Image (cartoon, helix red, strand yellow):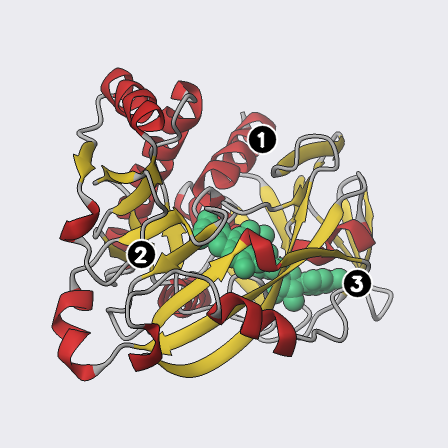
Amino acid sequence: MATVAVVGGGVTGLVTAIGCARAGHRVIVLERGPVPNPASTSADQHRALRVLRPDDLDGTLRMADARRRWLELESVLRTSIFRPVGVVTSATPDELERALDTARQAGLSATAVAPKTLPSVLFPAGTGGVLDPAAGVLLADRFLRAAAEWLAAHPAVVLRPGCAVTGIGDHEVILADGITAEADVVLVAAGPWTADLTGPPVVLHRQTMVYLRPPPHLARWWASAPGVGRIGADRRAWLLPPGGGTLLKISSDAVCREVATTADPEHGAWAARLLAEPILADAAGYAVVAVRDCHYATDPGTGGPVLSRIRPSVWSRSACGGSGFGTAPLVAQEILGAALEVSA
Ligand SMILES: Cc1cc2nc3c(=O)[nH]c(=O)nc-3n(C[C@H](O)[C@H](O)[C@H](O)COP(=O)(O)OP(=O)(O)OC[C@H]3O[C@@H](n4cnc5c(N)ncnc54)[C@H](O)[C@@H]3O)c2cc1C
């Protein structure tokens, strides 16, 4: 049996803690705020789980594995956290062929969809859609609450909310009060704040999201609608459908910018820019309920996520990228592998 210390109570930390506790390890979760923390990147109504990665068979197979692990978590927590509504991505005829080809190789039943089947969504000229039926929406806040409850009730888990970590050593975590917690394996999963504690350096991004309520006459249609990606003026926008107690959410890489710090979010002009994007038909009928800025970090070289082993006993989720929520069970598997190695 190993002792695993997890720094950060976002999705990465909580999924890892559940996996390690289920495998019989002792786990301590150190979170500077409450668990779950509304200020974490993970705290939101929903996050997309995309499985099909056109032209990337390995990535697609990895995401299919992540999806299987999310379904397993759903049964462990006995809470519905995944809405299997699929995700439609706009595609030119050439992109469609390539996406269908990757899906065939991965054994996924992706299909072409005509834009007229999604009349509330505006598709860019010259594109149709490809439906990834294995994809869907993770109910993020619901998962975080259920995970925190499950962990709080588990005898091998110590949840330490209000416990800021100030330093990381090999086999040890240094707390703000100077006390040191020892562990066989340490995962630093402090979201966009991870780089403050460990390397390597990352690029910090801020992105604005707008939450909308559809007009009443469309509520039923939206209740079973899929997520939609690669829409908007430059095909960088996406939407997550309402359902399971969530609102409709829109955003775009066009309103994502590099920032130096997570402090002082400012979203007014960015929200206006997002609302001007051609994403929804009859957009004026949708009520704006909320606007929010959220941060994530990426690897400066690849622009993607990174999990690195920075010391023999320490792993750092230094960049959590745009698919960081959906891939959390894959990080958990890595850490579980390290814990098994220690206890073998
Ligand atoms: C706009 C936007 C849209 C996104 N959409 C998607 C999507 O559709 N699908 C998807 O898969 N991913 C998406 N992501 C990415 C995903 O949300 C993140 O990668 C993921 O939530 C990161 O989770 P985490 O647990 O690693 O970090 P976080 O959720 O940020 O958790 C880190 C925790 O560490 C705590 N912490 C920080 N410093 C310390 C410290 N010193 N001591 C103790 N605790 C500390 C924080 O308080 C926080 O609770 C999106 C991100 C953004 C910004």
Residue matched to label 1: 338
Secondary structure state at the residue bearing disc 2:
loop
Tell me the amino acid under the disc marked 2.
Answer: Leu
Please state which of residues 198 and 209 is positioned toward the viewer in this rendering.
Answer: 209
Ligand 1's quadrant is bottom right
Which quadrant is the C terminus positioned in? top right
Residue matched to label 2: 122
Q: Residue 14 appears at what percent x and percent y?
A: 50, 56
Please state which of residues 162 and 46 is positioned toward the viewer in this rendering.
Answer: 46
Secondary structure state at the residue bearing disc 3:
loop
Residue matched to label 3: 261
Residue 104, located in which quarter of the rendered image? Answer: top left
Horizontally, residue 173 falls left or right of residue 151, namely right
Task: For residue 191, say whether it is visible.
Answer: yes
Q: In the figure, 52 relative to 252: above or below?
A: above
Q: In the figure, 256 relative to 280: above or below?
A: above
Query: Residues under labels 3 and 2: Cα distance?
Result: 34 Å
